[in-house]
Image: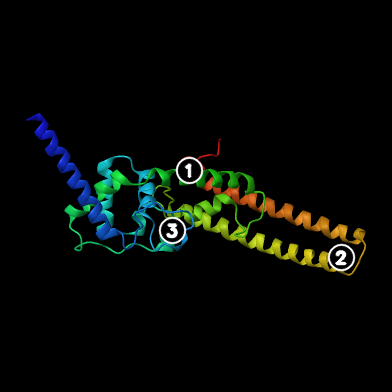
Amino acid sequence: MKKTLLLLSFISTMIYASNGAELTKANCASCHMLTTPTPDMIPDMKAPPMDAVMFHINLVMQKKKEIKDFIVDYVQYPDASKSVCESNKVQSYGVMPSLKGKVSEKDLAIIAEHMIADYPSPEFKAMIREIQKNDKMNALINSPFLLNSEELPHLTKLLLNNWDKEALGLTDEQKEKLLVVRHDTLRAIKEIKQKVKALESEIIEAMVDGESLEKTYPKLEDVAKLKVEATKVQLKCLKRSMEILNDEQIEFLLPFWDA
C-alpha cells in the first residue's frame, strides 16, 4: 500500500511539473527566453530571460509563498513600482502586459511553482557571479577618480540603475536632493571637459607645427590641473550622495564597500 501511495505521489509530482513547464512555455516563452542565455544575447531580447526574472526575485524575497504570491499578482497587475529589476531595465524593456483574464490564477500558480523550482539555472547563476565580480573590480579601479563617458561616478550610475527599485527605497525627498547633485556634477564636468578638449587640441596643433616641447609644458600642466578639478567634482558628488543615503541603501548599492 505504501509503495502504491509513493508511486501515485511521484506520478502526481511529475504530471504537475510537466504541466508547469508546458504552461510556462505556452504563456511566457513568446517574450521570456526559457533557456539559459549567453551575455551577448541579453541586449537583443524584448524581455528579461526567465533566469534573470527569478534571479532578481530571489534577491529580494526568500520565502516560497511570498515569491509565488508576488508572481501571481504581478502577472495580473504589472506595475513598474512593483518590479524587482533595475529601473533602467524596466525602462529598456517596458512593463509587461497584464495576463489577467488570459491565464487563470490556478494556472499562474502552477507556472509560479515551476519558475521557483527550475529558475535561475546553475549556469546562469555562475555567469552572474562572474559578471558581478568583474563589475566590482572595475568599479574599484575606475571610480571615482577617472572621468568616464557618462561623466558620473560609479555610485551615481548605480543610483540611476536602481532609481525606482523598491529594495533601494529612495524617498521623494532623497530623489530630489540626488537630482540636484547629479545636475551640479554634470554641469561642472562638462565645463571642465570642454576646457581640456580645447587645450589638448592646442597641444596637438603645436606638436604638428613643430613647436618646442618647452612651450607645450605649461598647457600640459593646465590639463593636469583641470583633471584634478574634475576628480574633486566627482569626489564631492560621491560625498554628497553618501550623505543623502542611509546605511542600508549604501549597503544595497555597494555591498563590497568594506571588502
Q: Quadrant of residue 63?
A: top left
How many C-alpha atoms fall within 10 Å of the one at disc 3: few (<14), some, or many (≥20)?
some
Q: Are marks 2 and 1 in contact (CB under 8 Å)?
A: no
Give the alpha-carbon distance from disc 2 to disc 1, as whole Å: 47 Å
Inter-mark Cα distance, 2 to 3? 46 Å
Q: Residue flagged by tag 1: what amino acid is it?
A: Arg
Give the mark nearest the N terminus, 3 or 1: 3
Does the residue at mark 2 contact the one at mark 3 (Cβ under 8 Å)? no
Label 3 sits on a secondary structure element that is helix
Q: Is 175 situated above or below 252?
A: below
**Residue position marked by numbered label 1 in the rendering:** 129
Residue 129 in sight in this render: yes
Which residue position holds label 2?
207
Q: Is residue 189 left or right of residue 65?
A: right
In the displayed structure, does residue 48 sit left or right of residue 224?
left
Cα gap from disc 3 to disc 1, whole angstroms: 19 Å
Question: Is 79 situated above or below 232?
Answer: below
Residue mark closest to the camera, 2 vs 1: 1
Q: Earlier in the sequence, mark 2 or mark 1?
A: 1
Q: Nearer the viewer, mark 3 or mark 1?
A: 1
Quadrant occupied by the N terminus: top left
State the residue at coordinates (37%, 45%).
121
Element on which disc 1 rests? helix
Amino acid type, callout 2: Met
Whole-percent x and y of residue 223?
Answer: 78, 58
Q: Could you say where residue 4 lies in the image, as x and y percent from the top left? A: 9, 34
Q: Residue at x 82, y 66 (%)?
A: 204
